[in-house]
Amino acid sequence: MDRGEGSAATRSGKGRRVNTTDLTKRRGKARPLDFIKLHLNILLFSFTTVFSKAASVQLNEHGLSSMWLYVFAFLMLLNCGIYALAWQQVIKKFELSVAYANKSVYLIWGQLWAVVIFGEHLTVMNMIGLLFVFVGVVVVSYE
């Protein structure tokens, strides 16, 4: 096997040759439906903060004896597991830089849930920060 620095082929874990150049080409072929799946997965992940905050509220108000603390903690862990599995499937269609730039939309969802579910207030600085995140995602996605 050629192990030169310019070689694009490597061995996979099962001994097969994998052309990494082909993998890179396939990864950049995201369709609009793929972006929808990506953002639905990010939306799913944003609920981790909701469950985490709900568990925190239960802990502060009722201590370790609260059944809801454990329910929300379980939902948080379950959500993270489902998200991890779905994320591995979704990012196969994207350049990693695009997928991870889009993942920052999670901050926007988190702020939305803070306002809608927990009654928190957005400051002007929060909105400016979210605008920067949104512009950054758009720039990276269309390069």
Image (cartoon, helix red, strand yellow):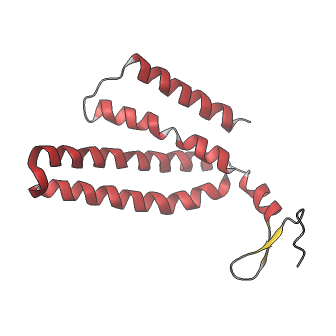
Q: Left or right: where does residue 92 sit relative to residue 125?
A: right
Foreground residue, 54 or 28? 54
Residue beneath the point at 45% across and 57% down: 83
Q: Please state the horizontal and vertical placement of residue 55, each as a whole percent of the image.
A: 22, 49
Q: Left or right: where does residue 74 sit relative to residue 23?
A: left
Q: How many marks?
A: 0
Q: Left or right: where does residue 143 sit relative to residue 79?
A: right
Q: Residue furthest bottom?
A: 15
Residue beneath the point at 56% across and 61% down: 88
Q: Residue furthest top?
A: 124
Q: Please state the horizontal and vertical placement of residue 115, each as a whole percent of the image.
A: 31, 29
* 26 is higher (above) or lower (below) than 133: below
Residue beneath the point at 87% across and 72% down: 3
Q: Please state the horizontal and vertical placement of residue 4, each as a whole percent of the image.
A: 90, 68
Pick the quarter of the image with the C terminus: top right
Pick the quarter of the image with the N terminus: bottom right
* 76 is higher (above) or lower (below) than 116: below
Q: Quadrant of residue 133?
A: top right
Residue beneath the point at 51% across and 59% down: 86
Evaluate whether residue 32 shows in this view: no
* 114 is higher (above) or lower (below) than 89: above
Q: Please state the horizontal and vertical placement of residue 62, each as a whole percent of the image.
A: 9, 48
Evaluate whether residue 96 shows in this view: yes
* 1 is higher (above) or lower (below) than 24: below
Foreground residue, 2 or 30? 2
